[in-house]
Image: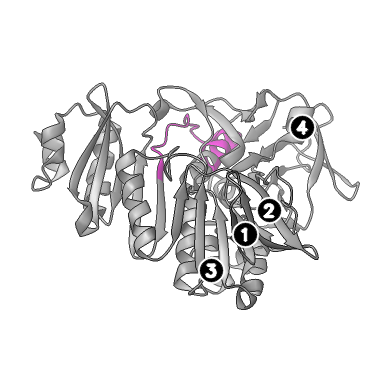
């Protein structure tokens, strides 16, 4: 390391940034650790924003990753309400938005991403929201009393979770998805069809294959959505959930390799010396995606990459990143748990009965189990993880037999 006084700077106060600081201390790093976060809150969990927090089921303090006092006890300096505008990898400094400069020995970039905005007329009207941070969720909640009709644009997890919460809050919800089915990028047609039917059964007007032409409004406030066929959907609120743009501009400007995210090796190192990247913004070669370079937007990925980076910095038995991907989504009384990556699958096996609202979809590629989507099927999720990790080659008819536990197939 360069000067022992500079320490480690972590850019980003989400799951990855918080776990990086925790893992540094757990692995014996005793120097200065600073988390620089754009928000004024200490690190908190993001997934509940579109679920329990927006529904009013959880107070904000209950989603802190650690109590406020924890950071002081661990001597982690929280520099909140600040962002990094530039990185100098040769001087080993970062420049903040207030013009101040901070030196580092190692830099961990955990800045996540910004919600992708609608590149359409009216996209900046009042009442148009994303769900990425507390301010977004608070703004939505503040407008609910004056809102009867909501249009949700985007049929990914964020859009579906928001639609579920707003429906439970007795709002009339229209969900618009440009692709032919919801969850098209992350799941097979069987799961998409199930969730489309569930949302419709709960009163959501769910439309796929729909083009949005513009958002319209009056006096700076949205009043509805104009579709490509000319039809108009009235709404006092529009929620946009169409993905994120990774926040990596300062790193790329400093010469880091990357485009859609910043590229990292199997120890989360960027192409710049002593600079690491983790979480949503880190593009890495993933063995569960046949070695393809991808970004994974999940709590699991952020936490596991944070631990890899911290151990590498500390020299504490550094291990390459090869964690098993997993995800979850709560909608209505449905708990979806996913393990592995289904991209590139050539066979999808239905296990159980979707009508019973408890089933799994198992994804195969060349006969090998590569992923599972489990709806209210915790046993399949736990046991199926071992099949994914083992790269088990199993016949589809055996996997489809729900009377046989998945663990028995692995042992056979």
User: Disc 3 or 4, which lies upstream in sequence?
Assistant: 4
234 vs 156, nearest the viewer: 234
Closer mark to the observer between disc 4 and disc 2: 2
User: Disc 4 or 2, which lies upstream in sequence?
Assistant: 4
Q: Which quarter of the rendered picture does the N terminus lie within?
A: top right
Disc assigned to residue 53? 3
**C-alpha gap between disc 2 and disc 3:** 27 Å
Which residue is identified by label 1? 238
Q: Residues within 10 Å of mark 4 (few under 14, many from 20)?
A: few
Closer mark to the observer between disc 2 and disc 3: 2
160 vs 275, nearest the viewer: 160
Give the x, y percent position of residue 134.
64, 63
**C-alpha gap between disc 4 and disc 2:** 52 Å
Q: What secondary structure is marked by label 4?
A: loop
Q: Residues within 10 Å of mark 2 (few under 14, many from 20)?
A: many
Is residue 164 visible to us here? yes
Question: Left or right: 174 with respect to 114?
Answer: left
User: Disc 4 or 1, which lies upstream in sequence?
Assistant: 4
């Amino acid at each position: 390391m360069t000067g022992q006084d500079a320490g480690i700077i972590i850019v980003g106060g989400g799951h990855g940034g918080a776990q990086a600081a925790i893992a540094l201390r757990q692995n014996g790093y005793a120097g200065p650790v600073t988390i620089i976060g754009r928000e004024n809150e200490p690190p908190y969990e993001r997934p509940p924003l579109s679920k329990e927090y927006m529904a009013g089921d959880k107070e904000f303090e209950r989603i802190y990753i650690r109590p406020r006092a924890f950071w002081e006890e661990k001597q982690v300096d929280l520099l909140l309400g600040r962002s990094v505008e530039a990185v100098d990898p040769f001087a080993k400094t970062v420049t903040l938005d207030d013009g101040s400069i901070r030196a580092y020995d190692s830099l961990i970039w955990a800045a996540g991403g910004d919600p992708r905005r609608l590149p359409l007329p009216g996209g900046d009207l009042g009442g148009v929201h994303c769900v990425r941070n507390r301010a977004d969720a608070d703004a939505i909640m503040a407008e609910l009393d004056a809102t009867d009709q909501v249009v949700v644009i985007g049929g990914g997890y964020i859009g579906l979770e928001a639609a579920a919460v707003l429906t439970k809050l007795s709002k009339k919800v229209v969900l618009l998805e440009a692709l032919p089915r919801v969850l098209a990028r992350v799941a097979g047609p069987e799961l998409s069809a199930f969730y489309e039917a569930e949302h419709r059964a709960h009163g959501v007007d769910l439309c796929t294959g729909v083009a949005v032409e513009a958002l319209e409004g009056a006096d700076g406030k949205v009043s509805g959505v104009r579709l490509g066929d000319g039809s108009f959907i009235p709404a006092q609120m529009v929620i946009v959930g169409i993905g994120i743009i990774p926040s990596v501009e300062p790193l790329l400007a400093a010469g880091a390799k990357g485009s859609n995210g910043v590229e990292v090796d199997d120890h989360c190192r960027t192409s710049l010396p002593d600079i690491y990247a983790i979480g949503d913004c880190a593009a890495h070669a993933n063995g569960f995606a046949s070695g393809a370079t991808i970004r994974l937007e999940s709590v699991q990925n952020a936490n596991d990459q944070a631990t890899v980076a911290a151990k590498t910095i500390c020299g504490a038995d550094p291990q390459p990143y090869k964690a098993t991907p997993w995800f979850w989504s709560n909608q209505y009384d449905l708990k979806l748990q996913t393990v592995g990556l289904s991209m590139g699958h050539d066979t999808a096996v239905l296990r159980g009965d979707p009508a019973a609202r408890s089933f799994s979809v198992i994804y195969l590629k060349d006969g090998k189990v590569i992923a599972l989507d489990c709806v209210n099927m915790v046993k399949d999720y736990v046991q199926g993880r071992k099949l994914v990790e083992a790269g088990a080659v199993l016949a589809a008819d055996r996997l489809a037999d729900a009377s046989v536990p998945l663990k028995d197939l692995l042992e056979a």
